[in-house]
Amino acid sequence: MTQVSIIGNVNADIIARPVSALPAPGTEQAIDSIEFRAGGAGAIAALCLAALGIRPALFGCVGNDPLGRVLLDELARAGVPVDGVAVGGDTGICIATEAAGRDRSFLIAPGSVREFSLTQVPKLAISSRHVLVCGYFLIPALRRGGAARLFQQVRSRGGQTLLDTGWDPDGWPSAAKEEVCELLPWVSVFAPNESEAMALTGEGKAWHAARALQELSGGWCIVKRGAHGSLAVGPDGAELEVAAPEVKVIDTTGAGDAFNAGIVRAQLEDLPWDQTVKFATLLASTVVSRSSRDRYPQWLGLAG
C-alpha cells in the first residue's frame, strides 16, 4: 500500500498585500508586495508533506502553457512527484488579497482543473493508506458522486479518506449542502474551516456545526479556526480543542491546506488524535509565519 495520494487543484497563487479594498474604478493603488508561488489546495498539501519527508502522489491538472510548466518544475524541485499531474487547457490562477484585521479573500479562475478526470487516478493511488481530496467545488470530476465513488473504493481497500471541500463559490445552495452531506459517510476525516462548517450546517457556533457533521460521517470532523486554533469531534463522543501558538503572521493563504498535510503526516506515525490535531495546528501556524521563499518547514516534532 502506498502512503499518501492527493487529489486536488494545482494552480498559480498570486498573493497581494495589504489590500483592504479594491481601488475605485479607473484608479491605481500601490501596495507592499505581490508574490507568486505554486498554489492550490492539492499542491500546497503536497509541498508541505514533501518538506516533511513524505513523497505524496499528486493528481490534478495544470495548463498546457508556460505557467503550467513553471508549476510542474517548482513541484518537482520540492520533491513532489508530478507524474499524476495532467496537462491541458489553461493554468488556473488564484489571486489572494490579504490585510491586517480582515480575513483573506480570493479571486479564482479555475482553468485547467476543469480538464481533470478521475480516470487519471490509478488503482495504486486508490489503494493508498491515506487519500486526501481537496478543492472539491472547483473540480467538476469530483462533483455529484465522483468523490463518493472514489472514497468508497478507498475505504473498501482499508484506506483512510480526508476531505476538505473549501468554500463553495456558488454560496452554498441547498443542493450543494446535500451533496456534501451525502458524501460524508465515506469520509474518515472532514476538515472544513469554521465559516464552511457553519455555512454547511446552518449552525451559529463551531462546536454545534462540528457535532452535526461528525454525526453524519461517523469519523472525525476537525474544524480549523485560524488564530483561534482548532476543534475536533470524533467517535464515541470524543471532543478536542487545540489553541494556536502565538506567531507573527506573515501570509495566511494555504493555512488550511498545510493543516490537512499535518493531519496526514501525524496519522502516518499513528499518533493519537489529540496529538494529531495539535501537530496539524502547529504546522499551519508555522507556515503562516513564513514567507513564500521559505514557506514549508522541513521538520517539526511529532511527539508531545
Image (spheres, grey):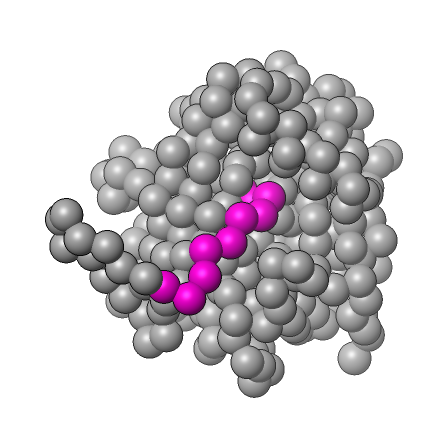
| Left or right of 51 in this view: 259 | left
Point out the image quarter for the N terminus: top right
Question: x and y percent of residue 88 in the render?
Answer: 55, 16
Instruction: Name which residue lies at 53% across and 48% down.
Output: 36
Q: Residue 290, can we see it?
A: yes
Residue in the picture at 61% in, 19% down: 87
Q: Quadrant of the C terminus?
A: bottom right
Q: Nearer the viewer, residue 154 or 290?
A: 290
Indicate whether 137 appears above or below 162: above
Residue 98 in view, yes or no: no
Quarter of image, res 287: bottom right
- Is residue 21 found left or right of 259 in the rendered image? left
Give the residues in magenta. Answer: 31-41
Residue extending furthest toward the bottom: 246
Q: Residue furthest left?
A: 25
Q: Is residue 15 above or below residue 9?
A: below
Compared across the picture, whether 109 is left or right of 174 comes to right
Q: Position of residue 82 (x, y in %)?
A: 74, 30
Of residues 253 and 150, which is closer to you in this image? 253
The kind of secondary structure the magenta stretch mainly shows is strand
Q: Is residue 32 magenta?
A: yes
Residue at image location 57% in from the left, 18% down from the top: 64
x and y percent of residue 291 in the render? Answer: 60, 65
The answer to whether residue 122 is magenta is: no
Hey, which quadrant is residue 178 in on the image?
top left
Q: Nearer the viewer, residue 157 or 276?
A: 276
The total of numbered circles placed on residues is 0
In the figure, residue 232 lies in which quadrant? bottom right
Measuring from the top left, give residue 261's x and y in whole percent. 67, 54
Q: Residue at x 30, y 54 (%)?
A: 199
